Amino acid sequence: MSTRSFIVKLWQDSDASRSQRSCWRGQVTSVPSGERRYARTPDDVPTLLACQFGKSGIRLGWYWRLRVTLHELPMRWMKGSRR
């Protein structure tokens, strides 16, 4: 049996003023590699886990492949603009 371990952390953003709705952030860390990915919202955490699953060779369904692609699209654009 093969296992994958991750550490998931969520925290309330201290920069949010009391008058604003609270803002939560997150982080997913792959235990074996130490690679960290950050979430702007708690809703991003499952997508970050799916990114790690894909890198580990776990076959994702179409829905999660689409979410991963959409999540990583801005990073691909930024890398392309540096050329």
Image: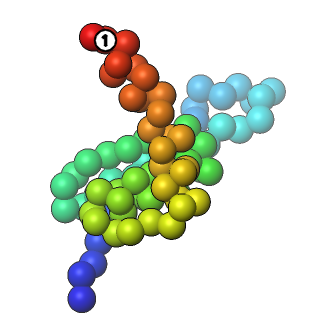
Q: Residues within 10 Å of mark 1 (few under 14, many from 20)?
A: few
SS at mark 1? loop
The residue shown at (53%, 41%) is 70
The residue where tag 1 is placed is 82
Q: Is residue 73 left or right of residue 63?
A: left
Q: Residue at x 27, y 11 (%)?
A: 83
Q: What residue lies at 19% left-to-right and 55% top-to-bottom?
A: 33
- The answer to whether one can see residue 52 in this image is yes
72 or 22, nearer to the observer: 72
Pinpoint residue 51: horizontal percent, then vertical percent: 40, 53
Residue 47 visible from this viewpoint: no
In the shown orientation, is residue 12 left or right of residue 30?
right
Question: In the displayed structure, would residue 36 be above or below residue 78?
Answer: below
Q: Residue 31, relative to residue 75: is it above or below?
A: below
Tell me residue 67's x, y (percent): 55, 50
Q: Split into 4 quadrants, where in the image is the N terminus?
A: bottom left
23 sits to left or right of 32: right
